[in-house]
Amino acid sequence: MSDHEYTPTSKVGKWFNDRLPLLTLANHLTDYPTPKNLNYWWTFGGILTFCLITQIVTGLTLAMHYIAHADMAFESVEHIMRDVNYGWLIRYIHANGASMFFLAVYIHIFRSLFYGSYKSPREIIWIIGIIIYLLMMAAAFMGYVLPWGQMSFWGATVITNLFSAIPLVGEGIVTWLWGGYSVDNPTLTRFFTLHYLIPFLILGLVVLHIWALHVPGNNNPVGIDIKKPSKDTVPFHPYIVIKDGFALLMFMIVFAFFVFYSPNILGHADNYIEANPMVTPAHIVPEWYLLPFYAILRSVPDKLLGVVAMLSAILILAVLPWLDTSKIRSAVFRPLYKQFYWILVADVLILGYMGAMPAEGLYLLIARVATAYYFLHFLVILPVLGFKEKTLPVPLSITEPILGGSPNLAMAKNKESIDK
Amino acid sequence: MKNFIKLFSILVLFFFTVTQSQSAEKVDYLKTDWSFKGLFGKFDRGSLQRGYQVYTEVCASCHSMKYLSYRNLGEKGGPEFSEAEVKAIAASFEVTDGPNADGEMFDRPAKLSDKFVMPYENVKAAQAANGGAYPPDMSVLVKARGGGVDYIYSLLQGYEDAPTGMTLDEGVHYNKYMYGNKIRMSAPLSDDLIEYGDGTKATVEQMSKDVTTFLMWAAEPHLESRHQMGFKAIVYLIILTILVYFSMKKIWSRVESEV
């Protein structure tokens, strides 16, 4: 998609490239014109790629030592922790890597929400992203089951039981998922198989995600279409590569703190107790990254409707490009949307907190209000806002706000010229 | 950049507090200085050896430690008994091996490669001998309790008379740190219950601290190398980050834009 035709300089290169244009692809990736005003919130795409590769590499290594059997899984994890060379390191990277992956993906998603990156012409990128996010949740949930601790077993029981809410066929589906009449060895082996498969599906979707991105090019903090290449863009290499690398290193420092100094803080203590179908833990809580959806599930009194609400909360994101009626992408030029955006962020954090608390009394009430607001934001506020909001004037190019000082100054100038 | 760092640290902080409030129940545990906490935390070798003594002379009559082997007692980062000592420890236990050439099972002294001998044949036998309650395996016990080492340390010293008005069933004891305050295990420690080989006075507090340290090592045998490697890894990352930062500044100085 570079504007110029690429021809390799060497003869061998040319011969090869005529048959398989890998060099053209490499050239496209290094030359790829990128808006030069991307801020650090844009570095999380690269960070996420790193997370995925880390999970796959550590996961493959763990799979060489792990035994997917109800009687041996817990013991094999302890074997990894004690006797496999650096097994503790690999497992702690993998377990904390899941949390880091979600931390990064939430930042990535909320960046998209702030700067309107999901809007035309980037709807397909966004929808592929939502599918990746769904697959990540499935992979993370099944991965958490594999150590076969108490929280693994009971988490699996609670989540699979949700399918029983489906009328008529629900019970049958649950038996089919379990491969029996309760969560047991057949459940563990199929979860292991799927946990192994899903990351490669994600990898394939990531390729599509990036391919779809390279058609229109990156959105940017100003949210305007830019000419490519132009003085508004820089080539991906070295500019974006070094910047992403710098951000990735900062991210890795946070990651390393978790792995080396608090490797178990993000997990639940009960998962170091071997699974016991006879003893139910006092509180069954999912991993932190699923808590907002868990809160939505529990805030609806009816089981079926709760499941519907939880699923809708995720799937509603897929139609977001059509729910948001505003033509302006970046929240920088949408004063009202900006406020609602931060309310939504707070709302999701509140939901996450309520998901960790017992579903009773004031907690439940707050969770219900927050759930209602979540849907209100997407179904009412966003569509109406597009028609009612008075947006700020948008600059014509990226260079303009930068050369004119701060973006606000450029906007003010713009406004003056319009007023005149 | 500044905004980014501000927001990012707020996020990480929030994330810490939520997960902490989720895992730790709000109980004031007894506090003591643990040598293994912090960036350079290491185990106190003497405490680990005394802790093993408490475990083997007191706890081991009911609690198994099935993921540990005798060889672990001599490994680096653990109690570090000498090889002769570990062999003597192992040899003092009997294990059933076999079948031999005649197809018979036979008893022999334990070797370094054997797992810790379990006090009961199976869970049912353990329950039968303990009024229905199963004394949990202690291999990863510290990590399996919300309060971690502080919880275990407090529990061992938390036996009191039940408050008036609270009736306890036969064989149930009151412990102020136990979830629900009712515990099947009777107070396991009392002053001078054992005689430490190194002459340390065996108070309940001392024994609690030693055995908890030992349990922490049992659950995290590679804790010391984890801390050492972590420090090196993070220092390395910080230096590399600084170098990359200046390279980035240099590269971006070619365009009229900020990074």
Image (spheres, coloured by chain):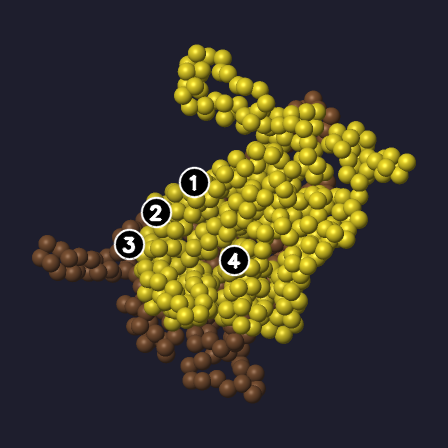
Chain colours: A yellow, B brown
Q: Which residue is mark 3?
A: B114
Label 4 crowd (10 A; few <14 / some 14-19 / many >=20): some
Q: CA distance from mark 1 to mark 3?
A: 32 Å
The residue tagged with tag 2: helix, strand or loop?
loop
**The one of A6 and A102 positioned closer to us in this rendering:** A6
Which dot marks residue A287?
A: 4
Q: Which mark is residue A65?
A: 2
Question: Disc 2 residue type?
Answer: His
Q: Position of residue A143 (x, y in %)?
A: 43, 53
Q: Amino acid at mark 3?
A: Asp
**In whole angstroms, how far apart are the C-alphas of marks 3 and 4?**
36 Å
**Where residue B52 sits: x, y (%)?**
41, 58
The answer to which of marks 2 and 4 sits earlier in the sequence is 2
Chain letter for the residue marked with disc 4 in the picture: A
Helix or strand or loop: what does disc 4 sit on? Answer: loop
Give the amino acid at mark 1: Val
- Whether tag 2 and tag 3 are in contact, CB under 8 A, the answer is no
Quadrant of the rendered image containing residue A60:
top left
Residue named by callout 1: A57
Residue drawn at point x = 59 percent, y = 49 percent: A106
Whether residue A147 is situated above or below residue A198 in the rendered picture: below
Q: Earlier in the sequence, mark 2 or mark 1?
A: 1
In the rendered image, the vertical position of residue A330 relative to residue B196, given as above or below: above
* Disc nearest the viewer among 1 and 3: 1
Q: Are marks 1 and 3 in contact (CB under 8 Å)?
A: no
* Residue A73 can be seen, yes or no: no
Tag 1 subunit: A
Label disc, if present, on residue A357 of the rendered structure: none
